[in-house]
Image: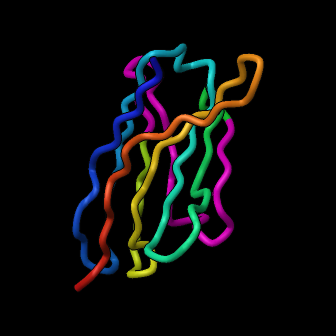
Amino acid sequence: QVQLVESGGGLVQPGGSLTLTCIASGFAFSSYAMSWYRQAPGKERELVATITGGGGVTNYADSLKGRFTISRDNAKNTVYLQMNSLKPEDTAVYYCNTVHYSGQWRNYWGQGTQVTVSS
């Protein structure tokens, strides 16, 4: 079955950097786009970034362009989110996501990893 396991979250000071990792299993990883979402307390889950299966195309939330970078290593079934110049408003649980179609669309989520930006 599809499994997504995130890691790399933690406490970081404003202006700092952090790299999140998501290891995927149970599907043909290189055939599917992967995304990172985040959910801050009291807010809806929002899309952070998406990368195509081959890694050639990426998209970002407008507010995060230039600070966050999504990448993937298909040999390792892994997708990354490099976060720079972190701000307190980046504090959230970050989730790895993939969407598959097999007669119907289905979202798969990891368990999430907490990122806290605070001095």
Give whichever of 66, 13 is nearer the camera.
13
The image quadrant of residue 98 is top right
- Say which residue appears at 77% left-offset and 18% top-offset: 103
Query: What's the coloring here?
Result: rainbow
- Say which residue appears at 62% left-offset and 45% top-offset: 50
Q: Which quadrant is home to the C terminus?
A: bottom left
Quick check: 117 above or below 66? Answer: below
What is the residue that sits farthest to the bottom in this orientation?
Answer: 119
Q: Position of residue 73 (x, y in %)?
A: 44, 27
What is the count of numbered marks?
0
Q: Position of residue 75 (x, y in %)?
A: 42, 17
Q: Position of residue 30 (x, y in %)?
A: 56, 19
**Image-based side of 109 in relation to 93, left or right:** right
- Say which residue appears at 62% left-offset and 25% top-offset: 32
Give whichever of 16, 79 is nearer the camera.
79
Quick check: 75 above or below 106? Answer: above
- Say which residue appears at 54% left-offset and 14% top-offset: 28
Q: Which quadrant is home to the N terminus?
A: top left
The image quadrant of residue 51 is top right
Quick check: 2 above or below 80? Answer: above
Quick check: 104 above or below 119? Answer: above
Specify the segment rendered in magenta.
Answer: 57-79
